[in-house]
Image (spheres, helix red, strand yellow):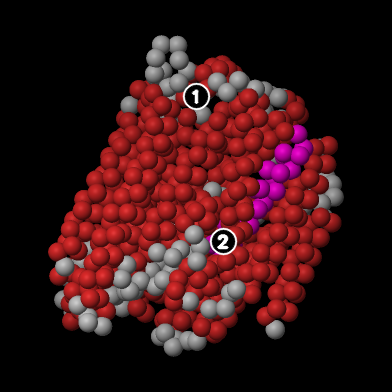
Amino acid sequence: MSSVMYERMRANPKFQELVTKRSRFAWTLAAIVLTMFYGFVMVVAFNPASLGQPVSEGSMLTVGVAVELFMFIFFWSLTAVYVRRANTEFDSLTQEIVKEAWKENK
Amino acid sequence: MMRRLTQFSTALGLLAVAALAYAGGPLEGVTEKQATNWHAIIMFCIFVTMTMGITYWASSRTKSTADFYTAGGGITGFQNGLAIAGDYMSAATLLGLTAMVYTQGYDGYIYMLAFFAGWPIILFLMAERLRNLGKFTFSDITAYRLDEGKVRTMAAISSLTVVCFYLIAQMVGAGQLIKLLFGLEYNVAIFAVGILMMVYVTFGGMVATTWVQIIKACMLLAGGTLVMILAFSQFDFSFQNLVEKATAVHKLKDKLMYPGSLLADPVTAISLGLGLMFGTAGLPHILMRFFTVTDAKEARKSVLYASGFVAYFFNVIFIMGLCGILIVGQNPEFFEGGTVGGKLIGGGNMVAMHLANAVGGNMLLGFLAAVAFATILAVVSGLALAGASAISHDLYARVIMKGQASETKEIQVSRIATICLGFVAIILGILFEKQNIAFMVGLAFGVAAAANFPVLILSMFWKGLTTRGALFGGYGGLVSAVTLVVLSKSVWVDVLHNPAPLFPYGQPALFAMPVAFLLAYIFSKTDSSARAKLEIDAFEDQYVRGQTGFGASSASNH
């Protein structure tokens, strides 16, 4: 039974649309996080001194602290962006796909 | 019958509390500050009474296996987010990371980012499919199209390994901490934690465990924020002012805000980053939290809230640690013998506690001590539930009984498993009292990253994974992670007293993870059995379900 349903959903062009859109979106965001995080780890490993510099003359705020604080906020904003889009656009697309698969049943 | 048992257990719990209070008298070698213990004990008793009440209420709502393992899938995204944050922020986070900032400055902040950065990745790549494919434990996902018996046995073994190492770390930490803060005997503290945990999990299941976690997360967030505000106000809330003064007095001087010795070489830095990031995505008690919500929508929201709380709290801890450098580090009252720069009273991990005492007096110290105890209790309960479900759901119900066990029987087994795990935790806690346990959490994360994570992610994303590949990958990751930790300095030198470590790095992830992935790949690719072909074909259906959530277990089932 569910196998038939899965077959139908897979055949629905909307399913392809959902998968392509969501995968592209999720992997883009993941790539941003991974690149920034491991880029940062590389800087920590190979050029730690650069992170100890103040952001401006006389300031006690170092580049390292500023960059990290930015990453905390930025990564969290990305999760918010993803949740927003997934919970509206992707979820309604999903519901349509499931509904259409049911309809074929009748 | 159940109700009577519950009443009995509540009485037992209160008895444990009474024993706590009774044993709270002064021990040898205590200073006058020990009087604060009563604040801590009273506040902790309030916490226990409250959570016991919840356990009593929860036990009447815990009837099916779904109630027991996942609170019937009826937890909202916000509640679950708090509970995940609670699971993630252990006492080690509060005490250990504050202390790390206090001694190492900026390095502590780097650690925190590594702890945090796994969450967005979990959301983007895993949350959706976890919720859509899983039911009670994460091996539901790996077992979806692979040989259930073999794959679940493996997942249960690696889950229990992770749970046991994590439990030892928490129990020993609990014993030491309670000994210090409450003035209790180490063994009494271990028993108190073990018994309270058994009561929560056995009677209240996931409902009680979740609420214990939520209450504790709120207490932790509130307590930490209060200490931070009171401390930071002494520097007029100026980061400039705070860092200027801190660098002036700290022994690292100008290097305080530089990446330092902790992450000296690139291999350690990258391996640690990998271990913390992907270890998070392989911890059984965290993964279990994806099944307590109604659907993928709520699962996503949980991660959003959880990562928000975690990110916020890490920044609070960073400020707390920096304030500690001045407020605690410059006050002779907090040092043994009154010499500034000597040994902190109670050891290096007590910075957060001394800071609370300095800015908020005995009341705040008592509150924070109670929070720390509650934190350990909550994390230990979550771990015990994850361990018990690996035994009862994976091993008993699915492998031994092949899905023929009745729900009542399954719950019974998980209750027995919880009690056994409780005693195992107590025994291990006592055995390891004098051991150096610093490597335990690292090991738990290493095994989670190398044994659980690769198989889980491959089963969700890679069509070609077969049972043979999953088994070689999973066991290969497990064995290599454990071996590398045993050969590293923290075990080979510190515990086994050999002159030099055979494996020069602390975190195994960078080496053990590729081993797991490679083995899984090779042994899947070379698997030409008929079974393998069926497994590969079954991926299509799994894929559609993972994407759409159609056929996923939902709250309405229960």
Q: Quadrant of residue B137?
A: bottom left
Viewer-proximal residue, A11 or B95? A11
Question: Residue B447's x, y, as percent?
Answer: 41, 58
Check the picture and name the quadrant holding the N terminus of chain B.
bottom right
Which residue appears at 84% of the width and 56% of the height?
B22
Question: Mark 1 is on which residue type?
Answer: Leu
CA neighbours of label 1 inside 10 A, class few (<14), some (14 to 19), many (20+) = many
Query: Is residue B252 placed above or below B280 in the rendered structure?
Result: above
Query: Is residue B41 placed above or below B208 in the rendered structure?
Result: above
Label 1 resides on the chain identified as B
Q: Quadrant of residue B376?
A: bottom right
Mark count: 2
Label 2 resides on the chain identified as B
Prevailing secondary structure of the magenta residues: helix
Which region shows up in magenta? B361-384
Question: Residue B282's x, y, as percent?
Answer: 40, 58
Q: What separation in Å lies between label 1 and label 2 (alpha carbons)? A: 39 Å
Question: Residue A79's x, y, as percent?
Answer: 36, 46
Q: Which residue is mark 2?
A: B210
Which residue appears at 34% of the width and 68% of the height?
B133
Q: Which mark is residue B256?
A: 1
Which residue appears at 81% of the width and 60% of the height?
B18
Q: Which residue in the rendered view is the most extreme toward the top?
A: A57
Q: Is residue B504 left or right of residue B242?
A: left
Question: Mark 2 is on which residue type?
Answer: Thr
Q: Is residue B17 left or right of residue B314?
A: right
Can residue B509 be seen here? The reply is: no
Pair 1/2: label in front: 2
Query: Is residue B538 placed above or below B208 in the rendered structure?
Result: below
Q: Residue B448 in magenta?
A: no
Precedes in sequence: disc 1 or disc 2: 2
Q: Is residue B405 left or right of residue B2?
A: left
